[in-house]
Image: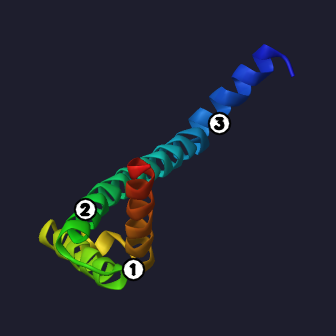
Amino acid sequence: MTTNNLITLVEALWESGILPALLILAIGWASARFARNRRLVELLKIASRAVQYAEVTFDGGQTQKAQAIKQLNDTLLRQGIGHWFTAKQIDDAIETAVKTMKEAEK
């Protein structure tokens, strides 16, 4: 395929509306992906603070985890973003925050 044929093909796709539609879909997909990543980063920040709070305030592993989850849920609901995350994502965020904290202590 020569360059002229490629240009002709792209022009035809553009004029038919196929290429603009594909571009809009690609932009929407990329935007959603970056928004999801920002949300998860924010969740991890809040989880880290909740784990630090539970570590200082409560004794015992299960009590600390339950209190960290409660603190995280309360913060998410207070900020109005609690509906963005599943229970599994919240639990995983707590576990990740605990691992990060333990690695930082070493």
Q: Secondary structure at mark 2?
A: helix
User: What amino acid is labelled 1 in the image?
Assistant: Ala
Report the residue marked by disc 3.
13
Secondary-structure class at tag 3 = helix
Q: Position of residue 54 (x, y in %)?
A: 23, 71
Snapshot quadrant of residue 69: bottom left
Amino acid on which the number 3 mark rests in the picture: Leu
| Marks 2 and 1, how far apart at CA | 20 Å
Label 3, residues with CA under 10 Å away: few <14, some 14-19, many ≥20: some
Of marks 2 and 3, the one in the foreground: 2
Q: Quadrant of the N terminus?
A: top right
Between disc 2 and disc 3, whose residue precedes? Answer: 3
Residue 52's disc number? 2
Pick whichever, 39 or 70, lies toward us: 70
Residue 4, image quadrant? top right
Tell me the number on the disc at residue 87: 1
**Which residue is drawn at the image coordinates 30% and 59% (left, top)?**
48
Q: How is colour applied across the structure in the image?
A: rainbow
Identify the residue at horizontal 17%, vertical 69% (top origin): 75
Amino acid marked by disc 2: Gln
Question: What whole-number distance in Å separates the C-alpha atoms at marks 3 and 1?
Answer: 44 Å
Between discs 2 and 1, the one toward the N terminus:
2
Q: How many marks?
A: 3
